Amino acid sequence: MPKPYWWITRPHRKPVNVPQSLAAFAGVASGQKWSGNRELQMAYENRLVELGLKRQGEYTERARGRGGSGGRTHAALLYSLGLFFHHQDSPDSREEIHLTLAGQALVDQEDALPILRKQILAYQFPSAFSIAQNVDRIFKLRPFVALLKLLKHPKIEGYLTDREIASCVIPYMTSHTDRAVDQAAVQIREFRLHDTTTLEESFARKFASPRSKKDWTADKLIEGGGTLGDIADTFVQWLRYIGYAVPAPGEVYGARERTVTALNPELVKEIDQVVDEWGAKPLETMYEPENDKFALAESKKAFQRGYGVKVGMTKDQRLVRDIRGRSETDRNHALVTGSLARLYETEMVTEVTDKVIDAVVNHCGLDRQTVAKTLAAIISSPATGKSAFLDRYEQMAYRGTEEAITFEKATETVLSEVFGLGAEHVGQAGTVPDVEVWSDSWGGIIDTKAYAAYDLPHDHQLRMHADYVPDYAAGVEGRPLRFFMYIAGGFVPSFDGKLRNVIDKAGIAGSGISIRAWRNLIHEYPESAMTHDDLLELWSLGREITVQDVAEALGSADQS
């Protein structure tokens, strides 16, 4: 029986781990047979555990001659995003795994966000992945475009909740046309007024998994932990990851839910542009030849290669023989990339040194000559090494408590190596901020928050003005404390008001900066005329520091 709702695989709710997962996958599977190859699937699963991308399991399946399901689930996520395809020369030949252009770009350590943003906007039903998962063919749309169009709809009043998406969108929205969006908006308005009483009487029976033995009600299905509720949350997390949506306090919109999803106010023009572009583009064709497995496999391959083109490209024109020739290189490249990503957790690698080679050899197990040659290709210049580090650093900013300490330590590296400041990670030494920072004449304290939308809760406000700031009354490394700052993946709209409250009570300047604005500053600062005192002025702004603020500070310094 086809799935009568949108479907998305979710080994992780947020796609922040995709670049590392893909590097691990390519390191194991490029050029190899994947389908039914449990040995390879378990090797990938083991690699994910080694990289901290999957928890160590008991692996009881392996004792029974099965296993590798964790690897298969993570690979399914990569396939669903159009990052690899299956190839066979003929119906009787061996299957091979190869990367699409988008997948190749990620393994080559190109900037991950633009690549994944394009793949997520282009994500569609039907697809090679969705037909394999038997999603009902009635769904013919780009779901993320549909959600963005809904958030822009005047009747929606600027927000959506997971329950609304689970009950009114995922099971019913079969197209992203304006008419379909209008119909969904009306249904959502009715749901806000009357809750589940507006749903069809057979809702629970119709949309509960036939394999589940639980006694599902409509309420349970659309809540977190329910089939539709979990799918809705995953779609929302992906939309937030690409930066076009943010979590926001429900009270701001008069919603009952504590947190809702709204459009990112900083990217409204860009959102309008991508909605127009991807809303108008025809869907990628997904043929389903009947009674011919090889023809179907060829159709899926064509779909994956079309879906998986890079930003700005329309067609993958590579010959399979040329792709095949890269497979062994890809495997080595991916293994080294994965090991390098671990190194980037603690340091910025801008040149290939003996120390770097030794660290990668010890982690990936390849011979020293191969590692040195591959590293030279990956870190072809200090700029490429820095860019790769920043990609990894940006991923940390969205991973919550999972990588909080890593994010703190990497921030210390940025402050010292990019800005030339004194910095020390102190975050694990009790009730203290995460990082101390100082110049010749001033000091500051920084708290890092690895969340896509940090809301500065009351206990965090109290900690800053009642504990941290008083504890540094004597200064930082002998310099007067001049500011505090929060660095996060992003902030909710209410952050500035809460920050002003902390500033008033602490009696010193404060600010917050999102990873997007922070990355721009990191990237541009070394070649700019900005001084440490210019940084102090920017970091004492008294509100969230935006991308525009960073651009203006850089421009002002260059003109003076």
Image (cartoon, rainbow, N blue to C red):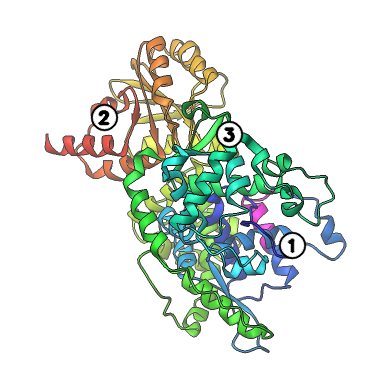
What secondary structure is marked by label 2? helix
Three-letter amino acid code at the position of disc 1: Gly
- Count the labels in the image: 3
Q: Mark 3 Cα within 10 Å, few/some/many (few <14, many 20+)?
A: few
Nearest to viewer (mark 1 / mark 3): 3
Residue position marked by numbered label 3 in the rendering? 193
Q: Name the residue under label 1.
A: 68
How busy is the neighbourhood of tag 2: few (under 14 within 10 Å), some, or many (20 plus)? some
Camera-nearest label, 3 or 2: 3
**Residue type at numbered disc 3:** Leu
Which residue lies under the disc numbered 2? 532
Q: Residue 207, how many percent across, how many down?
A: 72, 53
In primary-sequence order, the first of circles 1 and 3 is 1
Indicate left or right for 379 with 303 as reference: left
- Provide residue 220's location: percent of width, then percent of height: 73, 40
Q: In the rendered structure, which segment of residues is drawn in magenta?
A: 44-55
Above-or-below relation of 27 to 445: below
Kind of element beneath mark 1? loop
Q: Could you tell me residue 93's position as x and y percent?
A: 65, 87
| Most foreground residue, 190 or 340 | 190
Rendered-image quadrant of the C terminus: top left
420 lies left or right of 220? left
Outermost residue toward the left? 560
Q: In the image, 41: left or right of 425?
A: right
Nearer the observer, 510 or 535: 510
Q: Which is nearer the eye, 13 or 370?
A: 13
Label 3 with label 2: CB-CB less than 8 Å? no
Q: Residue at x 85, y 50 (%)?
A: 213
Q: Which of marks 2 and 1 is in front?
A: 1
